[in-house]
Image: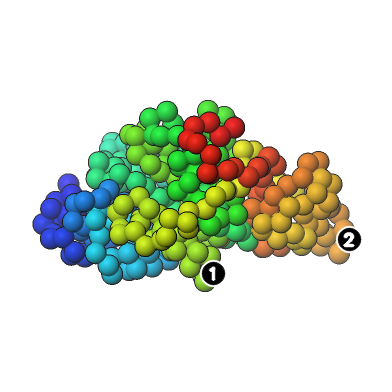
Amino acid sequence: MNSTVADHLTRMAAGEVDRGLMEVGGLASGNAIGVPYMIARGTGGGPCLWVNATVHGDESQASIVATEFFRAVSAHPLRGDVIVTPVANPLAFDQRRKHSPFDGTDLDQSFPGRSDFLGTQRLAHRLFSELSPLADTVVNIHTMGPFLDACNYAVYKLHPAAGDERELLSLIALFDLRVACRMDVSGPGELPGRVEGALDYQMLELGKRAFMLEAGAGGRYDRPAVEKAVRGLLRFAAETGTAAKTDAPGDRPASICRATRRTHVTSAEGGFFRALAEPGDVVPAGRPLGEIRNVYGDKVEAVSLPTPALVIGIRRDPIVHSGDRVGFVATEWADIDLTAPSGETS
Ligand SMILES: [Zn+2]
């Protein structure tokens, strides 16, 4: 193993800022597979925050948020260390693909990883074994796929080792999001795969605070979405004690919209999809989220749900085949009072 991030941090003085490349393997061409990182050394008086971005390579806006956050947070004295890995999945990222082109494996279903098998598992293992012991809090930034438009939202999981739900929701509320989605790890998940292999869940298992921030959609530069996400990260760093506190006490949000059930919505027909709702909208039962016309211009489908839906993402790329995802919605949600005493929230 080449020099570690932990070694790098110990060589730095409080207030210093630096960067490096974590070498996680090699290519046949002789080039290294490297994960870039940025680190800022605090005084040691606060927790270490790790902001990881773009475990899915087509979620490029997450990387923009991460680099901008690091510039902003490291411009001021810090109590705890900050580690930012803006491109966690470099092989997928450079190809604008969700997964590595070499093994097709989902990095965010691969933690804590394996040091002896597929490339993506090796990458997960190196990231996790190096950074999980250093980090006290983790924000893993994703976006929706580039074929959707989306609002900023959060996804979180619960684990008995890592504090109560209301405390986590209070921190997530600092990001001023449309909705925070609670994801059931024991269930089947929204898409096929191994939900418990997510970075945030593996960090919860170690007793650290962690969740996923979804910063709009990938493949674009949506300035308001980026600014909102960066602002949220700065507030999070201050509220958890990594950075100096700036907000007045009254600035902590009093409530958050929590979704406890959500689903992808798919099309039955192929053709051209036209959205009839926007991210953040609540669409009544039976009202179409969008309609599909076939290649001859005939209207062949109005995509609707039998229940009310809170639209989190809606398809922007019009081309759809049968079974393509045209929307991502919450079907069960409620406002959660964050001023009530800690404990059960449902
Ligand atoms: Zn993702």
Q: CA distance from mark 2 to mark 1?
A: 37 Å
Q: Residue at x 43, y 55 (%)?
A: 249
Extreme left residue here?
Answer: 11
Q: Quadrant of residue 263?
A: top right
Q: Residues within 10 Å of mark 1 (few under 14, many from 20)?
A: few
Q: Amino acid at mark 1?
A: Pro
Q: Residues within 10 Å of mark 2 (few under 14, many from 20)?
A: few
**Residue 55 shows up from this direction:** no
Q: In x, y percent, where is residue 42?
A: 21, 57
**Foreground label between 2 and 1:** 1
Residue under label 1: 224
The quadrant the C terminus occupies is: top right
Q: Are marks 2 and 1 in contact (CB under 8 Å)?
A: no
Q: Amino acid at mark 2?
A: Asp
User: Observer-nearest residue: 280 or 298?
Assistant: 280
Q: In x, y percent, where is residue 139?
A: 40, 50
Q: Residue at x 13, y 53 (%)?
A: 10
Dot label at residue 298: 2
Element class at badge 1: helix
Residue 179 in the figure: left or right of residue 250: right
**Residue 278 shows up from this direction:** yes
Q: Sequence order check: which comes first, mark 2 or mark 1?
A: 1
Residue 226 against residue 91 in the figure, above or below: below
User: Observer-nearest residue: 151 or 92?
Assistant: 151
Q: In x, y percent, where is residue 257?
A: 61, 47
Residue 346 in the figure: left or right of residue 134: right
Q: In x, y percent, where is residue 57?
A: 45, 56
